[in-house]
Image (cartoon, helix red, strand yellow):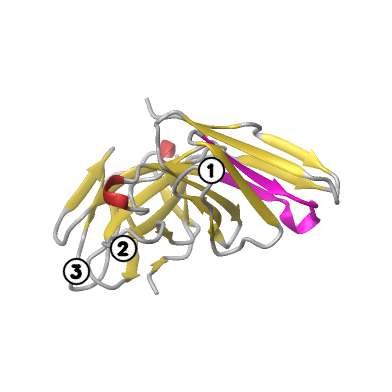
Amino acid sequence: DVKVTQSSRYLVKRTGEKVFLECVQDMDHENMFWYRQDPGLGLRLIYFSYDVKMKEKGDIPEGYSVSREKKERFSLILESASTNQTSMYLCASSSRTSGSLGETQYFGPGTRLLVL
Amino acid sequence: GNSVTQMEGPVTLSEEAFLTINCTYTATGYPSLFWYVQYPGEGLQLLLKATKADDKGSNKGFEATYRKETTSFHLEKGSVQVSDSAVYFCALSDRAGNTPLVFGKGTRLSVIA
Protein backbone atom coordinates (compact mmCIF):
# COMPACT_ATOMS: atom_id res chain seq x y z
CA ASP A 1 0.00 0.00 0.00
CA VAL A 2 1.14 3.51 -0.84
CA LYS A 3 2.57 5.37 2.10
CA VAL A 4 3.77 8.90 2.78
CA THR A 5 4.77 9.62 6.37
CA GLN A 6 5.56 12.90 8.08
CA SER A 7 7.76 13.12 11.12
CA SER A 8 5.28 14.85 13.43
CA ARG A 9 1.51 15.36 13.54
CA TYR A 10 1.77 18.37 15.85
CA LEU A 11 4.67 20.70 16.51
CA VAL A 12 5.05 23.80 18.71
CA LYS A 13 8.04 26.08 18.15
CA ARG A 14 9.18 29.51 19.24
CA THR A 15 9.73 32.49 16.94
CA GLY A 16 13.25 32.46 15.53
CA GLU A 17 13.79 28.72 15.92
CA LYS A 18 15.01 26.60 13.01
CA VAL A 19 12.36 24.00 12.20
CA PHE A 20 12.74 20.77 10.23
CA LEU A 21 9.75 18.94 8.80
CA GLU A 22 10.54 15.52 7.41
CA CYS A 23 8.65 13.52 4.80
CA VAL A 24 9.35 9.96 3.70
CA GLN A 25 7.68 7.98 0.92
CA ASP A 26 8.01 4.27 0.23
CA MET A 27 6.76 4.22 -3.37
CA ASP A 28 10.06 5.00 -5.14
CA HIS A 29 8.49 8.19 -6.48
CA GLU A 30 10.65 10.74 -8.25
CA ASN A 31 8.51 13.81 -7.48
CA MET A 32 7.92 15.18 -4.01
CA PHE A 33 6.04 18.31 -2.92
CA TRP A 34 5.52 20.52 0.13
CA TYR A 35 2.30 22.49 0.61
CA ARG A 36 0.83 24.60 3.32
CA GLN A 37 -2.90 24.64 3.94
CA ASP A 38 -4.66 27.61 5.51
CA PRO A 39 -8.39 28.29 5.94
CA GLY A 40 -9.83 30.12 2.97
CA LEU A 41 -6.58 29.82 0.98
CA GLY A 42 -6.63 26.13 0.11
CA LEU A 43 -3.35 24.41 -0.70
CA ARG A 44 -0.35 26.51 -1.66
CA LEU A 45 2.77 24.95 -3.11
CA ILE A 46 5.98 25.87 -1.30
CA TYR A 47 8.65 23.78 -3.05
CA PHE A 48 8.87 20.63 -5.10
CA SER A 49 11.58 18.26 -6.23
CA TYR A 50 11.67 16.02 -9.30
CA ASP A 51 14.90 14.20 -8.46
CA VAL A 52 17.52 13.78 -5.76
CA LYS A 53 19.26 17.09 -5.03
CA MET A 54 16.92 18.92 -7.40
CA LYS A 55 14.44 21.51 -6.17
CA GLU A 56 12.08 24.06 -7.66
CA LYS A 57 10.28 26.97 -6.05
CA GLY A 58 6.54 26.81 -5.83
CA ASP A 59 4.15 29.70 -5.31
CA ILE A 60 5.25 30.75 -1.81
CA PRO A 61 8.91 29.79 -1.18
CA GLU A 62 9.86 32.82 0.91
CA GLY A 63 11.01 31.89 4.39
CA TYR A 64 11.45 28.21 3.50
CA SER A 65 14.13 25.96 2.09
CA VAL A 66 14.18 22.26 1.24
CA SER A 67 16.60 19.37 1.06
CA ARG A 68 16.43 16.15 -0.94
CA GLU A 69 19.54 14.06 -0.32
CA LYS A 70 17.79 10.69 -0.83
CA LYS A 71 15.02 9.75 -3.19
CA GLU A 72 12.60 8.75 -0.46
CA ARG A 73 13.08 11.77 1.82
CA PHE A 74 12.16 15.43 1.33
CA SER A 75 12.73 17.91 4.14
CA LEU A 76 11.19 21.33 4.59
CA ILE A 77 13.22 23.82 6.62
CA LEU A 78 12.00 27.00 8.25
CA GLU A 79 15.25 28.89 8.75
CA SER A 80 13.82 31.26 11.37
CA ALA A 81 10.25 30.45 12.26
CA SER A 82 7.74 33.29 12.41
CA THR A 83 4.17 33.40 13.68
CA ASN A 84 2.82 33.76 10.13
CA GLN A 85 4.22 30.30 9.38
CA THR A 86 1.72 28.73 11.76
CA SER A 87 -0.13 26.38 9.45
CA MET A 88 -0.84 22.81 8.37
CA TYR A 89 2.01 21.44 6.24
CA LEU A 90 1.32 18.64 3.78
CA CYS A 91 3.85 16.54 1.92
CA ALA A 92 3.02 14.61 -1.25
CA SER A 93 4.77 12.42 -3.80
CA SER A 94 4.07 11.23 -7.34
CA SER A 95 5.71 9.11 -9.96
CA ARG A 96 7.40 10.72 -12.94
CA THR A 97 5.84 8.66 -15.71
CA SER A 98 7.06 10.02 -19.05
CA GLY A 99 8.75 12.84 -17.21
CA SER A 100 5.47 14.31 -15.95
CA LEU A 101 5.03 16.39 -12.81
CA GLY A 102 1.26 16.04 -13.09
CA GLU A 103 0.61 12.46 -12.09
CA THR A 104 -1.63 11.50 -9.15
CA GLN A 105 -0.18 12.79 -5.90
CA TYR A 106 -0.19 10.79 -2.66
CA PHE A 107 -0.32 12.80 0.52
CA GLY A 108 0.96 12.37 4.05
CA PRO A 109 -1.26 13.04 7.08
CA GLY A 110 0.08 16.56 7.61
CA THR A 111 1.98 18.39 10.35
CA ARG A 112 0.15 21.08 12.25
CA LEU A 113 2.78 23.66 13.23
CA LEU A 114 2.20 26.35 15.82
CA VAL A 115 4.81 29.10 16.10
CA LEU A 116 4.59 31.11 19.31
CA GLY B 1 -2.08 30.09 -16.62
CA ASN B 2 -3.99 27.04 -15.51
CA SER B 3 -6.57 27.48 -12.76
CA VAL B 4 -9.41 25.71 -10.98
CA THR B 5 -12.50 27.36 -9.49
CA GLN B 6 -14.69 25.55 -7.01
CA MET B 7 -17.93 26.58 -5.43
CA GLU B 8 -17.53 28.30 -2.09
CA GLY B 9 -18.45 26.38 1.01
CA PRO B 10 -19.38 25.34 3.47
CA VAL B 11 -22.10 23.09 2.13
CA THR B 12 -24.45 21.57 4.70
CA LEU B 13 -26.77 18.73 3.72
CA SER B 14 -29.02 16.27 5.46
CA GLU B 15 -28.24 12.59 5.22
CA GLU B 16 -29.46 11.00 1.95
CA ALA B 17 -29.58 14.35 0.14
CA PHE B 18 -28.16 14.80 -3.36
CA LEU B 19 -24.75 16.43 -3.58
CA THR B 20 -23.24 18.60 -6.30
CA ILE B 21 -19.97 20.46 -5.89
CA ASN B 22 -19.17 22.60 -8.92
CA CYS B 23 -15.70 22.78 -10.43
CA THR B 24 -14.66 24.66 -13.56
CA TYR B 25 -11.20 25.00 -14.97
CA THR B 26 -9.05 27.10 -17.27
CA ALA B 27 -6.25 25.32 -19.09
CA THR B 28 -4.53 25.15 -22.43
CA GLY B 29 -5.12 21.89 -24.21
CA TYR B 30 -6.85 18.99 -22.50
CA PRO B 31 -5.82 18.50 -18.90
CA SER B 32 -6.41 15.53 -16.63
CA LEU B 33 -8.90 16.29 -13.85
CA PHE B 34 -9.02 15.04 -10.28
CA TRP B 35 -11.14 15.15 -7.16
CA TYR B 36 -9.39 14.73 -3.83
CA VAL B 37 -11.01 14.35 -0.40
CA GLN B 38 -9.61 15.34 2.98
CA TYR B 39 -11.30 13.78 6.02
CA PRO B 40 -10.89 15.55 9.37
CA GLY B 41 -7.34 15.33 10.70
CA GLU B 42 -5.97 13.60 7.60
CA GLY B 43 -4.10 14.40 4.41
CA LEU B 44 -5.70 14.45 0.98
CA GLN B 45 -6.52 11.25 -0.83
CA LEU B 46 -7.51 10.72 -4.43
CA LEU B 47 -11.26 10.22 -4.83
CA LEU B 48 -11.52 9.95 -8.62
CA LYS B 49 -9.97 11.18 -11.85
CA ALA B 50 -10.65 11.53 -15.57
CA THR B 51 -8.05 11.93 -18.26
CA LYS B 52 -10.02 12.85 -21.39
CA ALA B 53 -13.21 14.54 -22.48
CA ASP B 54 -16.47 12.69 -21.67
CA ASP B 55 -14.69 10.32 -19.30
CA LYS B 56 -16.57 9.65 -16.08
CA GLY B 57 -14.61 9.03 -12.91
CA SER B 58 -16.35 7.23 -10.07
CA ASN B 59 -15.56 5.93 -6.59
CA LYS B 60 -17.46 5.34 -3.32
CA GLY B 61 -20.72 6.47 -4.96
CA PHE B 62 -19.22 9.75 -6.17
CA GLU B 63 -19.10 10.59 -9.87
CA ALA B 64 -17.73 13.37 -12.04
CA THR B 65 -17.81 13.75 -15.82
CA TYR B 66 -15.14 15.61 -17.79
CA ARG B 67 -17.07 18.18 -19.86
CA LYS B 68 -14.81 19.87 -22.40
CA GLU B 69 -17.54 22.11 -23.82
CA THR B 70 -18.27 23.68 -20.42
CA THR B 71 -14.73 23.18 -18.98
CA SER B 72 -16.28 21.56 -15.94
CA PHE B 73 -15.81 18.52 -13.69
CA HIS B 74 -18.65 18.70 -11.17
CA LEU B 75 -18.70 16.18 -8.31
CA GLU B 76 -22.00 14.42 -7.59
CA LYS B 77 -23.36 11.83 -5.20
CA GLY B 78 -26.92 10.63 -5.12
CA SER B 79 -27.26 10.06 -1.38
CA VAL B 80 -24.71 11.47 1.06
CA GLN B 81 -23.87 9.99 4.45
CA VAL B 82 -22.53 11.56 7.62
CA SER B 83 -19.22 9.84 6.87
CA ASP B 84 -18.89 11.92 3.67
CA SER B 85 -18.29 15.05 5.76
CA ALA B 86 -14.91 16.30 4.54
CA VAL B 87 -13.19 18.91 2.41
CA TYR B 88 -13.25 18.23 -1.33
CA PHE B 89 -10.60 19.57 -3.72
CA CYS B 90 -10.79 19.74 -7.49
CA ALA B 91 -7.44 19.69 -9.33
CA LEU B 92 -6.00 19.61 -12.82
CA SER B 93 -2.84 18.45 -14.48
CA ASP B 94 -1.79 20.01 -17.76
CA ARG B 95 -1.27 17.58 -20.59
CA ALA B 96 2.40 18.40 -21.01
CA GLY B 97 3.07 17.52 -17.38
CA ASN B 98 5.56 20.35 -16.93
CA THR B 99 3.94 21.73 -13.82
CA PRO B 100 2.56 20.17 -10.64
CA LEU B 101 -1.15 19.70 -10.04
CA VAL B 102 -3.18 22.90 -9.71
CA PHE B 103 -5.72 22.70 -6.87
CA GLY B 104 -8.93 24.57 -6.19
CA LYS B 105 -9.43 26.11 -2.76
CA GLY B 106 -11.56 23.26 -1.48
CA THR B 107 -15.21 22.95 -0.49
CA ARG B 108 -16.15 21.85 3.02
CA LEU B 109 -19.11 19.49 3.19
CA SER B 110 -21.00 18.80 6.42
CA VAL B 111 -23.67 16.08 6.43
CA ILE B 112 -26.05 16.04 9.37
CA ALA B 113 -28.13 13.07 10.49
On whether disc 1 and disc 2 are found on a single subunit, the reply is: no
- Residue depicted at x 72% and y 50%: A78
B2 or B68: nearer the viewer: B2
Relative placement, left or right, of B75 versus A14 is left
Q: Which quadrant does the C terminus of chain B fall into? A: top left
**Mark toward the start of the polypeptide (3 vs 2):** 3
Seen in the picture, residue B83 relative to A18 is either above or below; the reply is: above
Could you say which quadrant of the image residue B23 lies in?
bottom left
Could you say which quadrant of the image residue B72 lies in?
bottom left
A4 or B54: nearer the viewer: A4
Amino acid at the residue labelled 1: Cys
User: Which residues fall within the magenta stretch?
Assistant: A73-90
Amino acid at the residue labelled 2: Asp
Q: Which residue is mark 2?
A: B94
Picture coordinates of residue B19 (x, y %)?
33, 53
Q: Taking the image as drawn, is residue B18 in sight?
A: no
Amino acid at the residue labelled 3: Lys
Seen in the picture, residue A18 relative to B93 is either above or below; the reply is: above
On residue A91, the disc is 1
Picture coordinates of residue A91 (x, y %)?
53, 43
Q: Which residue is mark 3?
A: B68
- Residue depicted at x 23% and y 52%: B50
- Give the number of the mark in front: 3 or 2: 2
Seen in the picture, residue B4 relative to A16 is either above or below; the reply is: below
On whether disc 3 and disc 2 are found on a single subunit, the reply is: yes
User: Mark 1 belongs to which subunit?
Assistant: A
